Amino acid sequence: MHGNLPEIAEQFEEGQIEFCNSLGFGVLAGMVAGFSEVKNPEEFCNRVLVSNQISKIFKKMPSWFDVEFCNTLKATDWFCNGGRKTHEQWLDWVAENHPDVNLRVTRFVTVEQDSYTKMGVLANK
């Protein structure tokens, strides 16, 4: 969540602060992906994108939601009052609730998400 501080607002494009302050994004990032803050932008980005593909909270993630944007979230101390899931806890949630998705993983791969390519899924060796 971000306030209206000018030094924070100037680092975002129009609509981005509203998106990351939205209830939907708080639920997606905090409750589904299990992050209350951005510690590792690449992991944050990937888990949020995969969690959205599974939960379908948003029909389509914004095209600007990528690792670079997540770096900005980290630099501006974005947070939410969501849960904290370890990577293992998140993988267990995926396996329990979505057994068709195989994410027992060791490395990141690029996947197609709608009409543009995103880093979004973790793959087996």
Image (spheres, rainbow, N blue to C red):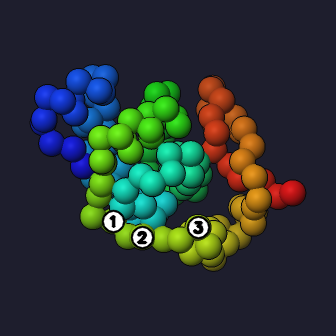
Decide if residue 34 is in sight here: yes
Residue hosting label 3: 87
Residue hosting label 2: 84
Q: In screen coordinates, is 36 left or right of 94?
A: left
Q: Within 10 angstroms of label 2, few (less than 14), some, or many (20 or more) residues?
A: some
Q: Amino acid at mark 2?
A: Arg
Check whether the beta carbons of the residues at disc 2 and disc 1 lie within 8 A of each other: yes
Q: Give the total of numbered labels.
A: 3
Check whether the beta carbons of the residues at disc 3 and disc 1 lie within 8 A of each other: no
For residue 119, which quarter of the picture?
top right
- Indicate the position of residue 73 as horizontal and vertical percent values: 36, 41
Q: Amino acid at mark 3?
A: His
Q: In screen coordinates, is 77 left or right of 87?
A: left
**Disc 3 or 1, which lies upstream in sequence?**
1
Taking the spot 33% from the left edge, 65% from the top edge, the residue there is 82
Q: Under tag 2, what secondary structure?
A: loop
For residue 109, which quarter of the picture?
top right
